[in-house]
Amino acid sequence: MSHYIIALDQGTTSTRTAIINQAGGLVSQNNQDFKQIFPEPGWVEHDPEEIWQSAVGTLKKTLEQTRVGGDQIAAIGITNQRETVVVWNRKTGKPIYNAIVWQCRRTQEVCEKLKKNSKENMVTKKTGLVIDPYFSGSKIQWILKNVPGAKAQARRGELAAGTIDSFLLWRLTGGECHKTDVSNASRTMLMNIHTGWWDEDLLKLFEVPEGLMPEIAPSSGEFGRTKGLGFLPDGIPIAGIAGDQQAALFGQTCFDAGEAKCTFGTGSFILLNTGSKAVTSKARLLTTIAWKLRDEKMVYALEGGAFICGAAVQWLRDGLQFFQQSSEVEHLAASVSSSEGVEFVPALAGLGAPHWNPQARGVLCGLTRGTTKAHVARATLEAMALQNVDIMEAMQRDLGKRLRSIKVDGGASANNLLMQLQADYAATEVIRPQIVESTALGAAYLAGLGIGFWKDADELRKIWKIDQGFKVTMTGKARKDRLERWAQALKRV
């Protein structure tokens, strides 16, 4: 009998495999880092073959570690870094260029030209997105234009394109399935979020042939079955796919309109479930598809993302060598009671929502002779929380009411100091679950629902457990003063 779900969580800096049991427990997990490639300033790439090998490596290691046989796996769920794209040859399965990562800014000029030509209103109405290099459409366009022969190959139907989920699905099924789910498709800037399919006007705008793109399917249900892997038997259904942030929203059981989560990963991303209504933001947030279950209506969300969150701590660790392990930042930051006026705006890859300033760069200011590593570390944690406040306040303006609470997940959510800062600055209770790897959990939940491993959302709510809640302790005046200092720092970028 099949007792487990595998969640394959392909992130920006590493790939994780998790095994989830029927009680929603995390049986085992392993992750493997892979190389970040920076060919030019502002450009970010990944080697798709290295991504695939990291997926294979973690799958094998996790199965061996737990001694779970392939016949015990009921289904596989995939979640992934979203806007990152790959183009590969259908016959050989080989990528024709490195994956262009969501952080990459190489198509800035293309996006600026589209905005100058008054295309943004049309794009936003159809996609819920703003025109920005962040999204996939201009990345695919760049590959087709810059790889010799790619455009002609695409016209002849020899190439396939997709976000990382599509590439992994292709490999897992031995090249038999070229599909994606609605949540990932909604991040390409090529899909109409109201029709749920590729849009003719958008494809033409970015010069992308529709035949290049995968079939769009619901987030839960059978996409295909494993074939020719060796380390897993043929025939295991891949039954759930969602972009990482949507998967985290699902994994946090935010199934009702008005429920929200914040994932603290490489960036930080807040999603608010808006139900079957695609809410148009007046505060420069994104309207996106959260998920679609079989035979049910599309579920939408408002989203705001800060491009640099946990990556700021990685920069302190690797770039400035403040400490050896990222987890050390909490102790260092807690060794001082305040940042003593030090402000860090971590716009190391531009500013995301609600500012949308791709040309912004990081600012570290307020330094004195008395400034130490500890003050900079604390300013970094404060900035991570303050970026999220900007997004949450924009969401609240769109909704016309305050968020009563927000669920948190991701690696940095284990940082108690950061979680308390988040609660105080946002004036909102922060709730952390027992399993903070909500992205993987969401992929598992979607796959399990897709095959009947779990019956429905109510069953999932029952198995989801709280670890700790962080109540607001800051006075209104202190909060107002802190937000004003942050606003002044933002003016410096």
Image (tube, helix red, strand yellow):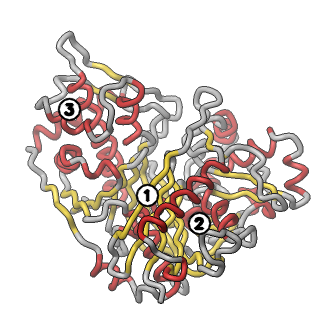
- Residue closest to the far top: 369
Viewer-closest of 195 and 17: 17
Work out whether mark 2 precedes mark 3 in sequence or the reverse, and give the earlier one.
2
Q: CA distance from mark 1 to mark 2?
A: 34 Å
- The amino acid on which the numbered mark 2 sits, given as a three-letter code, is Ile
447 and 180: which is toward the camera: 447
Q: Quadrant of residue 236?
A: bottom right
Q: Does residue 425 appear to the left or right of 57 in the view shown? A: left
Labels 1 and 2 touching (C-beta < 8 A): no
Residue position marked by numbered label 3 in the rendering = 332
Q: Amino acid at mark 3?
A: Leu
Of circles 3 and 1, which is in front?
A: 1
Residue 195 position by quadrant? bottom right
Nearer to us: label 1 or label 2: 1
Dots 2 and 3: beta carbons under 8 Å?
A: no
Query: Residue drawn at (37%, 63%), measured in percent from left and top?
Result: 438
Instruction: Please state, as top left, top right, bottom left or bottom right, where the C terminus lies in the image.
Output: top left
- Percent coordinates x, y for residue 245 in the rendering: 45, 59
Residues packed near mark 1 inside 10 Å, few (<14), some (14 to 19) or many (20 plus): some
Q: Residue at x 16, y 34 (%)?
A: 481
**Foreground pick, 292 / 97:** 97
Q: Is residue 137 left or right of residue 350?
A: right
- Label 2 sits on residue: 193
Q: Secondary structure at mark 3?
A: helix
320 in relation to 478, above or below: above
Q: Earlier in the sequence, mark 3 or mark 1?
A: 1
Answer above or below: position of 68 versus 30.
below
Residue nearer the viewer, 424 or 174: 174
Which of the numbered marks, if any, corresponds to residue 177?
A: none
Number of the label disc, if any, that sits on residue 30: 1
| CA–CA distance in space, label 3 to label 1 | 27 Å
